Amino acid sequence: MHLGVILNRVFRTKGNPLFDYVESHSDVIDKLYFILPIEDLSDASEVKQNYYYDVVKSFVHVLEKHNIHPYIIPYQKLGELGDELELSHILVAKDIMSYHKESYDFRHVKLAFQKHEIEVIGQRVNHYFHPSTTFNKQKQPYQVFTSFYKENRGKLSHTPRNNYQFKQLSQYAEKGSNQSELQLNTNNDMEKSARKSWTSFLSDDISNYDKLIEDVSLDFVSGLSTYLAYGLLDIREVINDLLEGYESNEKNYEAYIREVMFREFYYILMTQYPETATKSFSKKYRSMQWSYNKSHFKAWQEGETGYPIIDAAMKKLKHTGYMHNRLRLVVSQFLTKNLFIDWSWGEDYFRKYLIDYDNASNVHGWQWSASTGTDAVPYFRMFNPMRQSERFDAQGHFIRSQLSVMKDVSNKYIHDPTKNKDKLKENFNIEIGKDYPEKIVDHKESRDHVMSKFKQF
């Protein structure tokens, strides 16, 4: 066997099933090549590009310390390299949902290699469950999270660690070269940093998890979504840690495990219904006549809607690549309900900006907000942006951190500047419509519009 191992988005040296597969099949491998194809992120934000490249460079740095030198190439040259190396087989992750482009997904890569007559071996590396092991009695995936959770929560158990040796792997592997434009100049170990951050969260912050999930000033609560999106941590290691610490604070540990299970739930649904990446999960809403108002969409993108909590969240996303989960719910409902814009527009925008982007979680999160997805929020339950602002940023700290024009505005007026425009002009010399935008839509009017549209179905 002439085996090529694709390492993209499995950027870890510990708990890596790809390395484990190689060692356990060493007796049938004649030639071994580690390959790191670089994604095309030309349409992604600069902060997302930089994070991805930093992780890649860090991973290569650590691999080279173990005397492993991968072939580093652009994704589009994978087939060409396979022919050049005369590969008979390719080993690749089959469960990653965080690639920047759909064409990098397992099913597309498999078809591409088959055209080169290279056999593809898929390996589960970034999710805990194999989809079919979670199905209901009718051998169908659960479409309601509570049912999925109750049936599969008990299947979480402690998993033994992989015990492959890099000394042996480096002896098998051929030495590759950097054929990309990426400059490999770093001494960072981002896998080590991720593990340190995760350990710190478990030793301290998880005990306050119920409070942290409502603190919108945070970039993130634990950072796990980013670590999993880049394969910096092994999901089995994460589950082991959660089970081991469970008795120290059952309430918060269980709440956190529930969120990890949501990730698995959405992943499984996406494997069974891949068309929902671009189409409503609920078929009856596929003919919905959304608004495609480009000026409204641009105002939402730029954080110029006249709703401070929305604008602050969108500006932070654009500059940092991060957005607290609570704010993701608020801004996605605002786009799909208040502006009544197609959820897929917002989903694609998040793909370009979110550092922790995961297709399954992002798509189903957006469809939840749009009321078109599985187990989605009922269409008549629509967030009021001002009430969300008053509840989750009562003191206005987050708004002020992102909107400099609001830095001196009191809590009494900061959540609804349009309503209080006379007071803002009089007390803070802020002119609504000039210094800060007036609301682009009225919440009550937009709610009435949403109700009338959904009631047609």
Image (spheres, helix red, strand yellow):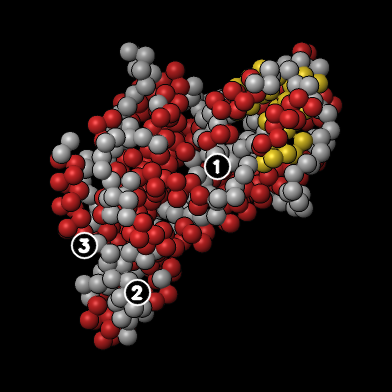
**Label 2 Cα neighbours within 10 Å, binned few <14 / some 14-19 / many ≥20:** many
Q: How far apart are labels 2 and 3 at the CA level?
A: 16 Å
Between 126 and 224, the one lying in front of the other is 126
From the viewer's perspective, is 89 left or right of 43? Answer: right
User: Residue 179, can we see it?
Assistant: yes
From the viewer's perspective, is 369 left or right of 272? Answer: left
As helix, strand or loop, the secondary structure at mark 3 comes to loop
Reading the image, the residue beneath label 1 is: 100
Reading the image, the residue beneath label 2 is: 436
Using the rendered view, name the quadrant where residue 82 is placed. top right
Using the rendered view, name the quadrant where residue 14 is placed. top right
Residue 426: image x %, image y %? 26, 86
**Label 3 Cα neighbours within 10 Å, binned few <14 / some 14-19 / many ≥20:** few
Reading the image, the residue beneath label 3 is: 442
Q: Amino acid at mark 3?
A: Asp
Which residue appears at 43% of the width and 68% of the height? 402
Q: Amino acid at mark 2?
A: Tyr
Give the mark nearer the N terminus: 2 vs 1.
1
As helix, strand or loop, the secondary structure at mark 1 comes to loop
